[in-house]
Image: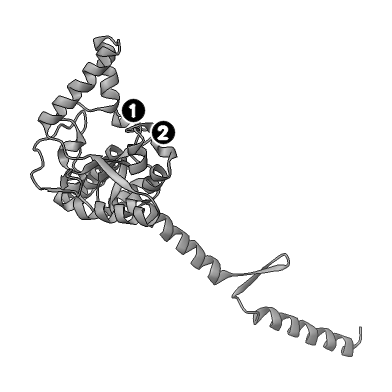
Amino acid sequence: MSKKLLSLIGILTVIFLGLIFFMPDETLVVGKQAQPKTQTVKENKSSDKDKKQAMALPSVKSTDWNLILVNDTHPIKEENKQLKSLPNGYEVDERVLQPYLDMEAAAKKDGIQLTVISSYRSVAYQEQIYKEAYDRHINEGQTPDEAKKSTAAYMTTPGQSEHHTGLALDVVDQDWYNSGQGLEEEFIETPAGKWIQAHCSEYGFIVRYPPNKESITKINYEPWHIRYVGRENAEYITKHQLALEEYIDLIREEEKVMEEKNQK
């Protein structure tokens, strides 16, 4: 082989190695498509951050006033005394009055006239309406056991009702109510029922007894029964499709972990 040929091969080799050595490392070539290294790393970090934020609970306490739990295993300890009247005379906790009025005004702008047909109830009044419901089922021909079961399906035992808190309201559409219809599951099929489901969390409310949670709440699905928990709590509960009991359990678990951590 001639010296000229060897020299040419040597020059080409140096050029080739130089191209490889000085090739920008920002790009990896996979097949025919170039993929930036730095962008991939940033996207992964962003994705991890979003997941952590989605899982994080709001910075609240299980003992906050708007998270008071009243159900069949947590009877009311003290009836609410901080009450104010809505325009139609029904009473609510004074801290709930403005959020509800704001929600009602927003619904009206969308062509829906919401109306409250039940809110705060004293234990004594709950005893009265519970007995009325029970007697009605008896008059319909049910046995005492059947009447008790039927009453308990949509009404809580006195002392165990959320209505004692002043944070719960039964809300329907005015047209629905005027037509003689009341607290019926079919309400969810109305524009008002759908509006409440879609928007109540924006004002700090949740549908307290959601579908498919009866084993937890012990109450059948009630699309008309909303409960104030505060906007941050409401949006988390609604997004993750939780019952209030489940949400409070999550908060208590986190509080327990933090307490154990602080003790170490």
Above-or-below relation of 108 to 149: below
Residue lying furthest right: 1
Note whether residue 209 is visible: no
Q: Which residue is mark 1?
A: 215
Residue 80 x/y as whole percent: 10, 42
Q: Return the residue nearer the eye: 242 or 152.
A: 152
Looking at the image, which residue is at 36% across and 46% down? 196
What is the x, y in percent for residue 99?
24, 54
Q: Is residue 135 shown above or below 31? A: above
Q: Give the image quarter of residue 256.
A: top left
Q: Is residue 185 above or below residue 256?
A: above
* Quarter of the rendering containing residue 191: top left
Q: Amino acid at mark 2?
A: Glu
SS at mark 2?
Answer: helix
Mark drawn on residue 193: none
Count residues near mark 2 (Cα–Cα under 10 Å), then give few for <14, some for 14-19, many for 20+: few
Mark 1, Cα crowd under 10 Å, few <14 / some 14-19 / many 20+, is few
Q: Amino acid at mark 1?
A: Ser
Label 2 – label 1 distance at C-alpha: 21 Å
Question: Which is more toward the observer, 67 or 57?
Answer: 67
- Residue 152 lies left or right of residue 75; in this view the side is right
Picture residue at 10% right of the left edge, 35% below the top: 77
Q: Residue at x 20, y 47 (%)?
A: 66
Q: Which residue is mark 2?
A: 186
| Nearer to us: label 2 or label 1 | 2
Q: Which residue is more in the foreground, 176 or 212?
A: 176
